[in-house]
Image (spheres, coloured by chain):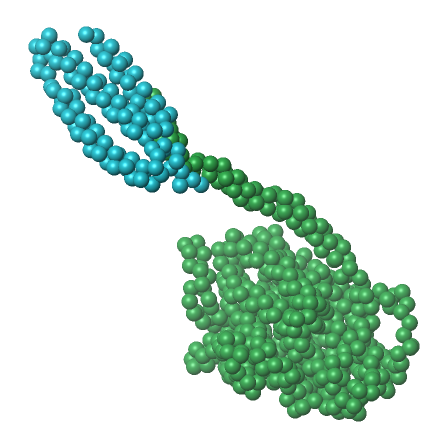
Chain colours: A green, B cyan
Amino acid sequence: MGNIFQMSWLIPVLPLLGFLILGLGRNAFSRSVTTIIGCGSVLISFIISALLFNEIVGGSIAGNNIHFFDFLNISTLYIGFDFKIDQLSGLFLLIITGIGFLIHVYSSAYMKEEPSKDFARYFSYLNLFIFSMLLLVMGSNFIVMFIGWEGVGLCSYLLIGYWFKNAAYNKAAQKAFIMNRIGDLGFLLAIFWMIAKLGTVSYDEVLSAENLARLTATDITGITLLLLVGATGKSAQIPLFTWLPDAMAGPTPVSALIHAATMVTAGIYMIARANVLFSMAPITMNIITVVGLATSFVAATIALRQHDIKKVLAYSTVSQLGLMFLALGTGAYTAAIFHVMTHAFFKALLFLGSGSVIHAMSGEQDLRNMGGLKKSMPITHFTFLVGCLAIAGIPPLSGFFSKDEILAAVFSKNSVLYYFSLIIPFLTAFYMFRLYAMTFLGAFRGTDEQRHHLHESPLAMTLPLIILAILSFVGGWVGIPDVLMHGGHKLAAFLEPVFQKSNLMAKSHEISHATEYTLMILSVLIAVAAIVIAIRRFAYYSKNSEEAKSIGKFLENKWYIDELYESIISNPLKYVAAFMNNMIEKKIIDGVVNGTGKLVNFGSRQLRWLQSGQVGSYVLFMTLGLLLLLIIKLFM
Amino acid sequence: MDIKAYIVLSLILFTIGIIGVLVRRNAIIIFMCIELMLNAVNLLLVAFSRMHATNASVNHVAAANDAQVFVFFTMVVAAAEVSVGLAIIVMMFRNTHSVDVNFLNRLKN
């Protein structure tokens, strides 16, 4: 145990150092130096995380805490700045640093046209993000998690608004941050509730049997609901999901890292951490299920009709997050974490691939102007295809195993829900292959100038794609369900210590092997059907074959949800703000402040007349003053 | 004699002195009025001293002569102040060729 465990503080500190060095010295470094510092810090973190993971798998570390310093120490409340290294955090460490490193390498090529100080600024923000995310997953109490939580929200804002000269991008960044904040309020309230009832925020203590017994059912439901609000904000569920598609304003590697692989999974992580608490609150679990399914459905339908390559992927992310929430809601925590892992692989792959496409198309993002890129970008095409197959859930790629586990869990909980959920894989496969077909198949629909510029991306961009494609292919093999291979679900065995209490509490009906085979075949058939239909429809897409029917228009405009929010929430707030400004700010407060100035002016002008220069009047005032004093002395 | 008479006389002299200081324009007259005020006070001091002495001799107790000594003090102060004041008036005359205090308005505004 000893050595690596003691060094685990380095894992978040190295990216923090990278952030400080690059942030403070951004005017001084060249692009190569920035790349080395930025990528190097994450690489070393990844190596240490891998060694740590090795120890965890070997069983020598399980849920141990490292104490750094006392964060808050007053008589009734103690919060220590501690890290908890266990199976769950170890797994997330690998995902964050590993995929983070690949994206750093990719970014060094993608962003190379930026001036070197903006380039350094970008890498410093990326490093800060990695630091915050690591803090989030490594914390051993809700407060350290919250620090990381806020940090990733901040970095999301900084990175989405990276090209800050564009006002629309700034608005998107603000939208992301503000919606996140709304969720954070829920999280904070949950923490306060915990402190009020239990006097502690540490995972070990809050989730211990004695403390849980002290909470009433209202407490548990309340705390879990508030934690859920926090998770919906961060993981883009209904109603706080509209920030994620807008967040595509940021550079594509940012979208890959933050909005596909890491930040948005923070909500899932939080619920998985507090799994015991959630398992004791069936009402909340039902709400999570409903929210997850609804979000998944709504986002999938919107993705069907989007024309921007990144927007399709954004809604796809929201939809897949909905699936993860659905898994959490039915108590299948391992399935949700499994899907987090596989989703990180193939979604990052898809985003990076789309970045490669956008690069080749000289910044074009509209699907209607792409097509036939198969010939000009073979590596991107092949890896993108792997990603699409993974997300559609075709065996033996990773998406199949994780998605199937979720669906099996839903079926064993409630078979009616299962039939509703079946539409999600269909829609997923459909819109993904619509994206694939419109981008890579058929004839090129762009301008001639774009056609000349088409090229495969450099190695720094294609190598991460290849690595992620390999991971998307084999990543599911750690979670082969029992029906196919006895003892094949290594991930479940690995995460068992984290989830065992919840698993004991869950009343799950075992489904027979025959049923499970049927479910698997059913989902594969649905996916294949969707793929075939999509390719047939969109492989020879031409621009004029698009009529916007009523439902189509509804989906294209994102169910008009943004407009709804604007009319219900933004506009009333703007009216109140305008009223406050005109009435209170201008008339009252300015009136008082300006009035005081005018009063002083007036007073001083009057007082000036005293200085007449006449000696006589001076003597008069002297005598009057003396008289006054005498009178006061006599009569007091 | 009744002490009241002396008090009234002293008051009247003092008031005349004050009003003279406030109203008159000639600097020398103002100084005369200041002297008037000082002398009114001297008068009062001496009168009271005499009253106390008379009372003491009637009631067979010792009487102090503090007030009479204090009169010396006031006279000394008056003399010093007059010398300084007249010097100022001479300077004033040299600058403005008049002893009218209303002409000394360089501190205006």
Question: Whole-percent x and y of residue A7?
Answer: 45, 79
Question: Whole-percent x and y of residue A586?
Answer: 63, 47
Left/right placement of residue A557 relative to residue A150 reads right
Picture quarter with the N terminus of chain B: top left
Question: Whole-percent x and y of residue A158?
Answer: 61, 70
Question: Whole-percent x and y of residue A260?
Answer: 67, 74
Left/right placement of residue A623 relative to residue A253 reads left
Residue A229 lies, with reference to residue A538, above or below; the image says above
Left/right placement of residue A580 relative to residue A384 reads left
Residue A130 lies, with reference to residue B76, above or below; the image says below
Picture quarter with the C terminus of chain B: top left
Closer to the camera, B102 or A235?
B102
Residue farthest toward the front in the current orientation of the protein: B97
> Can you see residue A622?
no
Q: Residue at x 90, y 74 (%)?
A: A546
Quadrant hosting residue A362: bottom right
Quadrant hosting residue A238: bottom right
Q: How many marks?
A: 0
Q: Residue at x 76, y 81 (%)?
A: A388
Q: Residue at x 27, y 13 (%)?
A: B8
Closer to the camera, A261 or B61?
B61
Closer to the camera, B24 or A547?
B24
Residue A345 lies, with reference to residue A629, above or below; the image says below
> Can you see residue A29?
yes
